[in-house]
Image (spheres, rainbow, N blue to C red):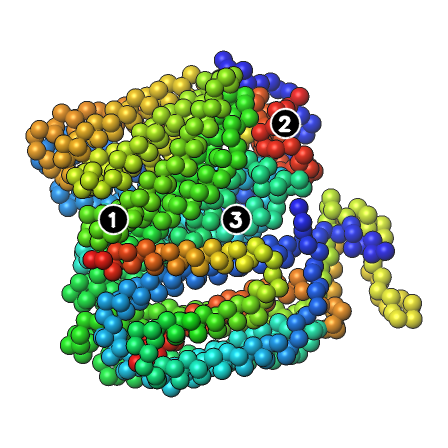
Amino acid sequence: MNTAHSVALHHHKDYTGSKIGIWLFLMTEVLLFGGMFLLYAVYRSNYAEDFHAAANELDTLVGTVNTMILLTSSLTMALSIAGIHHGNRKLAIIMLILTVIFGGWFMVNKYFEWGAKIAHGIYPGSEVLGHHPKGELIFFGLYFTMTGLHGVHVIVGMILLTVMIFKVLNQPRKKFEFVDGMGLERVLGGKFIVKGKDGGEVWSSDELDDSVQSVKIDVKYWPVKKRFRIADFNQLENSGLYWHIVDIIWIFLFPLFYLIT
Amino acid sequence: MGNHVITADTAAGASETNFYHVKSRWSGLAAWIFSTDHKRIGLMYLFLMLSFFAVGVTLGFLLRMELIAPGRNIMSAQTYNSVFTVHGVIMIFLFVIPGMSASLGNFFLPLQIGAKDVMFPRLNLLSWWLFLIGSILAVTSLFAGGGAPDTGWTFYAPYSIRTGTNVTLAAFAVLVLGFSSILTGLNFVTTVHRMRAPGMGFFRLPLFTWSLYATGWIQVIATPVVGITLVLIMVERTLGIGVFDPAKGGDPILYQHLFWIYSHPAVYIMILPAMGAVSEMISVHSRRAIFGYKFIAMSSVAIALFGSLVWAHHMSVSGNSVVANFIFSLLTMIVAIPSAVKIFNWVATLYKGSIALETPMLFALQFIFQFMIAGLTGMMIGVLSVDVHVHDTYFIVAHFHYTMFGGMVMAMFGAMHHWFPKMFGRMFHQLPSKIGWFLIFVGFNTLYLPMFILGWQGMPRRYYDYLPEYQNLQVLSTVGSWILIVGIIIMIANLLHSLKHGHACTVNDPWGGGRTLEWSVPSPPPLENFDEIPTITRDAYHAERTGAR
Amino acid sequence: MDRDHDEQHEPVSYGVYILTWVTLLVLTSITVTVAGMDFGSVSVFVALAIASIKATVVLYYFMHLKYESKLFHVMLYVVLVTLVIFIGLTFTDILFR
């Protein structure tokens, strides 16, 4: 039935392949932080008491609140994608915005938390730390590096999700292309017509003569449920997966730094 | 000479629309550096890598010149430290690790599985750009302010934290290069899972593809660990967090653990694709299906697996616990087994095969001979009581040059000849290629065999000066380097000359024994590789050929 | 080659995600409370165990791992086991110095 569809240039997307790719990338993130978790495990074993003492200097309340914030941001992220699956673009956008806001809130808390530490002279290479036992030095070295790297990942995620907001606003849409050697020859000599609901002609193009080199049609649909194809929201899903991994990293960072009191 | 087919008998449409002639919106250089075609990307990697190899060889040449006699000859001690560091960094990170995966792997993986390209072509191009940027950063670290790094390519703490040379920049360069490697591995693993031609189950994959698949997994799993290690070195140098600094309670051996957790699997990233290519060359040039296909395929996976568990054998004299030393020594013995499996199967393939001593076959045979020396000496140093004596001596230097250079690089030279007609539509000149091979063979072994003896006698590695009793073998070794370099120059010059002036060779199967899919398309291949994706009904090295009729 | 054609399987209901989130908040509360009690050397394992449960919940529901094919599960397990082995083998050095 859809003959124009079948002759046009189709950019086949492999949805599962794309998913495999992003999962492999996330595994590299796990191993990246894994190296530092290895260091933590070793130094925790070597300096058990110093770690215990140093952890007392961290504010458990801020840590707990930040954990809740990040967990909630994971919820909004998942709801955003669920919104797409249910054909509700408005919900998806709202949830994405909330996710970015939660990420920002997390970073603001982090900023104040770090600020307080630095104001007290507790930062890598500081003189104050130089007087503390070696184990505490290492604890804070690991603390700043691991939460710092994690924070970088949160910021990257926020940027990514902001870009996704704009991409989702652009969906659902479909592109058709008729170029030389791929379908153009079949439409030359004809013309494109848009018909209204009553069958009457709403718009038609000029006749496509030999001067036409290519035809590109970009159809933006109303965001109704049946127009949403999951495969089109590949990038959003992949971004969501990234965001969840960042959350999972924090799920482990939190008890290891804040709860070993 | 030989029995390959070089006629002008072009298959229909063979040379008019090959991938070099594709029109795009770019022209000239831009048509290459912005291309997402895996074949162009593979060739761009090859070009860059061979250029860096030339630089690395030059540095090696200079090292050997300095070592021709005791005392100072052509450079100071500080310069010597920097030269061997940069020689290692360039050879390992800019040449052998991207190695056959990025170059020939990129070109041939889609062809071998019957696909039009890799899964993520734009990511593939990004990998190449990251490789270029990382390389430029690495080269810059030689000349920028603090001077070339002098820590050895291994960047061991605490010296790497204290030295004023450009370690931070070099570490960052390697980080970027590592990211390039990760993306390539990710790309290849996904490609093999999703883009095989209909009917090509995993156990119908060619062995080069199997090796690229196993290598891809190592790239994805191991590389991030060196990534974070290098980040930590940079943070240590700039912020002083203390994790590797004994003055602050850190443990420098932990640096070594993290470093080698990547760097040992990295040697399998280097060697696995080389072994895959050796399987291809042996099969084609002895006109036989590979013996023990499944064993070779599974041995690639086993090497990837066990090779990830042996890293601390590099540290047995660094201060490891005795328990760790025992365990890692045992694991090291185990990882030798799958490599031996491959050697047995190659030899069994050669047995009663119709062997043609084409240049690729010569390199493949050289690989087997030299890799056996490498592997057996590896087992020797895996034994703790031996390692205590030979660690950090020339014995180790000889061992790893036999594996990386005598193994991987020779396989790569062979593969470059083997797939030359396919990539360029021309056949290389035969006689110069064999002369080049012979000089390389003689030169390589003259350069490195004496080093086993020197090491055994106690000559330490990375030393600028030495006692007079070592001089004879040092001179022999240096002379060997000259012969080797002449051979390499002849080989490269021959290949370059053949690019323009070799016999035109556009048939699908110039060697006449090709069984895998790359030999079923024209030479060079068209842009999308296959006019029609084939359906596979036979295993990879089936009895009948897929070659030109 | 088994290229899927746009799997439009039944979407997961919003409720599942809300329930997952509540579970995570509860687990977080538990882990904070438990940290206040003294279990000695077992504390770190308890904390890690609860963190692992939280991570598993995020993986299975938020990240859809429950609904994915076997390949994804295998990928994850291979990586996790490898990481555990890296840490474990390093401890054969650290613990016996």
Q: Position of residue A22 (x, y in %)?
A: 53, 59
Q: Which quadrant holds the C terminus of chain B? A: top right
Closest to the camera, between mark 3 and mark 1, is: 1
Decide which of B433, A255 is in the foreground and name it: A255
Q: Which residue is mark 3?
A: B189
User: Neighbour class for label 3 at 10 Å: few (<14), some, many (≥20)?
Assistant: many
Q: Position of residue A123 (x, y in %)?
A: 25, 76
Circle 3: element type = helix
User: Neighbour class for label 1 at 10 Å: few (<14), some, many (≥20)?
Assistant: many
Amino acid beneath label 2 = Thr
Residue depicted at x 74% and y 68%: A227
Asked if both marks, 1 and 2, belong to the same chain, the answer given is yes
Q: Is residue B227 left or right of residue A205?
A: left
As measured in the structure, the alpha-carbon distance from the residue carrying label 1 to the one carrying label 2 is 50 Å
Residue depicted at x 50% and y 69%: C56
The furthest residue to the top:
B1
Q: Position of residue B41 (x, y in %)?
A: 50, 43
Q: Which mark is residue B113?
A: none
Amino acid beneath label 3 = Val
Q: Is residue B199 left or right of residue B364?
A: right
Q: Earlier in the sequence, mark 2 or mark 3?
A: 3
